[in-house]
Image (cartoon, helix red, strand yellow):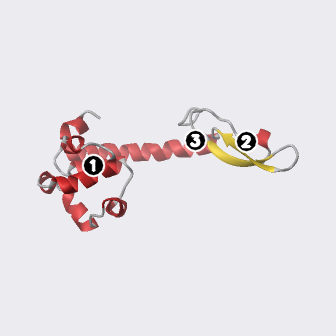
Amino acid sequence: MKKKDIPQDNEGLSEGKLRDLCYAVDENGNYMTAYSTGWTPKNVAMKMAWDVIEKKVEETRKKVLSGKLSQLAYYMEKNIMNLKLLSQYTGIPKRKIRKHMKPKVFEGLDDENLKKYSQTFDISLEELKDIKRIENT
């Protein structure tokens, strides 16, 4: 693709704020890097993907507020993590994480485990423990 043909559709999720690094050919036929603000098919696909993610986060939030899951499940979903990935980040086995997603078990967790989770999600211990914070999102 020639540099002048790199798509610059500013109507995507980033609205021109984020850019992709692309390779293009300049006027002399040499490869170079250039930025693109996206193109419509990619922007539509990204919007669809984020809609699915946001729906899953909202469904998980409702389950947490109804007492079916602990806050841990919400923050996992919000950070687009699964059991395996969270286990790798925290060093906590997947089976234990699965248990920690039960509200009663989560309430009894010690600060050592909670700190691993809060550091992984980049939030404070208080934010992790406070279910009211999830109500207002």
**Image quadrant of residue 5?**
top right
| 2 vs 3, front mark | 2
Q: Is residue 100 above or below residue 7?
A: below
**Image quadrant of residue 18?**
top right
Q: Which mark is residue 6?
A: 2
First in sequence, mark 3 or 1: give its number. Answer: 3
Q: Which residue is mark 3?
A: 43
Q: CA distance from mark 2 to mark 3?
A: 14 Å
Residue 38 in the image: state x and y as whole percent.
Answer: 63, 40
Viewer-nearest residue: 134 or 125: 125
Q: Is residue 55 above or below residue 111?
A: above
Q: CA distance from mark 3 to mark 1?
A: 32 Å
Three-letter amino acid code of the residue under disc 3: Asn
Q: Residues within 10 Å of mark 3 (few under 14, many from 20)?
A: some
Secondary structure type for disc 3: helix
Three-letter amino acid code of the residue under disc 1: Ser
First in sequence, mark 2 or 3: give its number. Answer: 2
Q: Which residue is mark 1?
A: 118
Q: Residue furthest right?
A: 28
